[in-house]
Amino acid sequence: MSALLSGNAWVNPFLGALESAQVALGSAAHALGMAGDSHGQPAWPWTKRLAVEVLLIDAGVARQLALALAATSGALLLAIAGLFWRRLRIALLAAAVLAAWFAPWPDTSLWLADAVPTSFQTTSFSVEAVARGAARYARDCAACHGDTGRGDGPRAATLVRWPPTIVGPLLGHRLDGELFWRVQHGMHARDGTQSMPGFKARLTDADAWAILDYLKVLAAGGGVQDGDGWPVPVALPALDVRCGDAPAEPLARWRAGQRVRAVAIDSRAPPLEDPRWQTLLLFRDGALPSPHETARWAANGYASCVAVSPGAWNVFAGIAGVSTQRFAGSQLIADRDGWLRAEAKPGDPAWADATLLCAAGGGRAEGVDRSRTDPLTSLLLRIDAQPVRYVKGGYVH
Ligand code: HEC
């Protein structure tokens, strides 16, 4: 057993299994009526949850927990065997008691964290929500958190505690549902004084989720501006796509597991279709081509699928970290799992100067090896070879 546990390769599958067991337990409790709803979604019924964020970085605690679980399950098996195996009953039950007694459970403060009813709730990330969240953020949050989310709003200096910067790993260290709870119910310092007000009375649940979606865009764009890449992976936002003169459909259905290349254009000259990806054309609101026009592009082999959700241009510009005026000509690539991975600046159709903004598992900015003959193909191969394994608040998403 200890030889098996000496490397760290087992940690990820072990934590994955714990996560699934925990989620299954929560769903079972909800199905059995032990937990009601909170903020419109199933509530987490307990005040504690596994502190996967601690177990992920402290393999020692994870190992001890694994041994304790193994010992306890062993005890359970011995006890069951003892019930059926009359001749060895005494010995088996004694062994079961010993195994349960000596199970090396680590201190609970090391592997349990405080939970709230919304801990495991999330929402989908959409263009519509980000656009709405931006307006609500400006109204309710920017005074303290600052227009760019760096915690430098005009009221920041007057507070008991300085607001943290959103432009960095913070959002990745928290569970969405716990951020949501803090926004709606406020935060308190250790001595009980309120450090951030709650917004339950001012914001609907949908608005609070929308602001959290907008914070992801602020964090991504700010990271690019600082030259650090995206601090946490960013998914393609949900939006509606219209191809040629066909009816619009949700991006997820249109994408169907393919890579996506999003191109911001302000002319009527779309790029040619390319079998390596699906091309998503972004236009400014009010400048969308007509279905008749895109049908003609399709007939001539040009890209003809347009993001028709209002605000798509602004949301993608925000993610890319450029102003909406300077966004024309930019391109972004999303991998087959729907994670945005790389960006090319205007005037770089060959992707020679492309930047991998989301290296697998974290946002480390890296230039692409230019010695290869086709920079774009080598970029795509690299992205495929390193899929994003997103760990948020310790939990794999
Ligand atoms: C009155 C000033 C103020 C306003 C208004 C405000 N915040 Fe905060 N916010 C703070 C302070 C101060 C903290 C740090 C609190 C702490 O760590 O105890 C904070 C912390 C946060 C955090 C980090 C939570 C964490 O887990 O560490 C998030 C996210 C956040 N605020 C979002 C928002 C959003 C969204 C709004 C608007 C709906 C908002 N805040 C409005 C002052 C404010």
Image: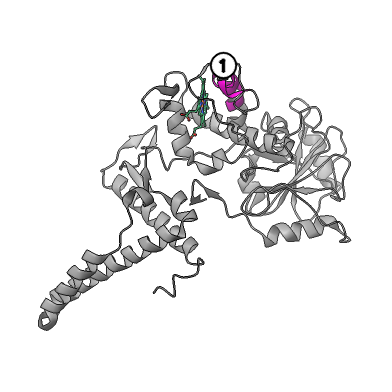
Compared across the picture, whether 232 is left or right of 266 comes to left
Image: 337 above or below 314: below
Task: Return the x and y of residue 162 as percentages of the image width and height.
Answer: 54, 25
Q: Residues within 10 Å of mark 1 (few under 14, many from 20)?
A: some
Residue span colored magenta: 133-146
State the residue at coordinates (55%, 39%).
171
Instruction: Give the image location of residue 283, x and y in percent.
Output: 77, 32
Q: Nearer the viewer, residue 176 or 152?
A: 152
Assign the magenta stretch its main secondary structure: helix
Percent coordinates x, y for residue 83 in the rendering: 13, 73
**Mark 1 residue element:** loop
Please determine whether, in this image, residue 206 is positioned above or below residue 256.
Answer: above
Residue at 36% from the left image edge and 34% from the top image edge: 38
Q: Is residue 54 visible?
A: yes
Residue at 82% x, 34% y: name it: 328
Determine the image quadrant of residue 137: top right
